[in-house]
Amino acid sequence: MAILTALSELKSVGGAQLLKQTYVGMLENVQKGTLSDIIKNKDLSGDPSGGTMTAKRFQNTESKAYGTARAGGAGQVLKSLNVEINLDTDRELINEIEEKDIKFNTVDGVVAKKAAQSEKSMKRELDRAFFAKAEEVGTEMFTAETEIGAIFDAMVKPCKTVENEYVDGVDVEDIVVTMDTDRYDAIRNKVDSLDNANISSDIAAIGKYHGYLVAENLRQSAQFIVQRIGSIAQPVWPTLDDPDKIPMSQAYHFGLFFSYGTKDVTPDTIFVKFGYTLTTDVAIDDDKTYYTKSGNVYTAVASPLVANIATYYERD
């Protein structure tokens, strides 16, 4: 492909090829480079360009005595629950280039640089939205345990033992545990301290601890998020901007638009743990949620009173 020498060439066939090639690669990197992509539900149906996609939750089936279907004239009906995911978050990453921006660079080089910046922006936004949804819908867990290994075990057990009409326990290999930096470092230090040649001490961005997939996550506020793979869906629909000159200027625009939706499919397989500290506030901040503590349980205060503020907690 020929190197573009002028911004006006962004509107040419060569410019269209350059933008398509650059942004297809960028979007592939976004999918591969987000922590959430490893966890999210990808078994979706529907056309994302229509603004809605669907995930299905299938009910458990139990074996019947031989001959039951023959006697009844039919087998068991496969029952499912449809979960609609609306792609209702509309975003854009539109870049503007002035003629002077390519004096010491090529159009191709500037396009590549801007696409790389957009890639990082998309990764941050999608991951933050994904884990914010997990924190919103997950069941909050409390424990009296203080040792990191015991806390970890207390967090994963509820997910592993979920039982209802849709879930009959969750296999260890289907559970992902993401932790904030302090909790992740504590787990790593615990692994490093064990005198066991069969235990790896180099847990990377995604590793395993006691058979569970574990990862450090800088884009969650909870100390722990435990979830079954597929618990949350986040379809993304990108479209390229048609590059053109900005009226009454020497600048051109290019980039992409994208819409996405983040929806819990199996909220019953998501568990979270937050940290709490006593507030230092001396007056009620209406933008904050305060909590009271009873034993190991923290409860949100519906109508906080300044007279009680010294006893209130905030999430870390």
Image: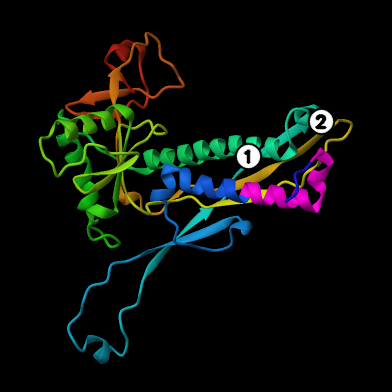
Q: Amino acid at mark 1?
A: Ala
Q: Is 11 inside the magenta-drawn segment?
A: yes
Q: Is residue 239 left or right of residue 40?
A: right
Residue 315 in percent (x, y) is at 34, 25
Instruction: Single out the residue that lies furthest toward the top.
Output: 282
Q: Main secondary structure of the magenta part?
A: helix
Q: Which mark is residue 115?
A: 1
Instruction: Single out the residue that lies furthest toward the left.
Output: 195
For disc 2, the marked residue is 99
Residue at image point 32% right, 66% down = 59
Q: Identify whether 298 is placed above or below 206.
A: above
Residue 211 in percent (x, y) is at 21, 49
Q: Earlier in the sequence, mark 2 or mark 1?
A: 2
Q: Is residue 200 left or right of residue 238?
A: left
The structure's colour scheme is: rainbow
Instruction: Single out the residue that lies furthest toward the front.
Output: 2
Please provide the residue range marked out in magenta.
Answer: 5-23
Residue at image point 79% right, 53% down = 13
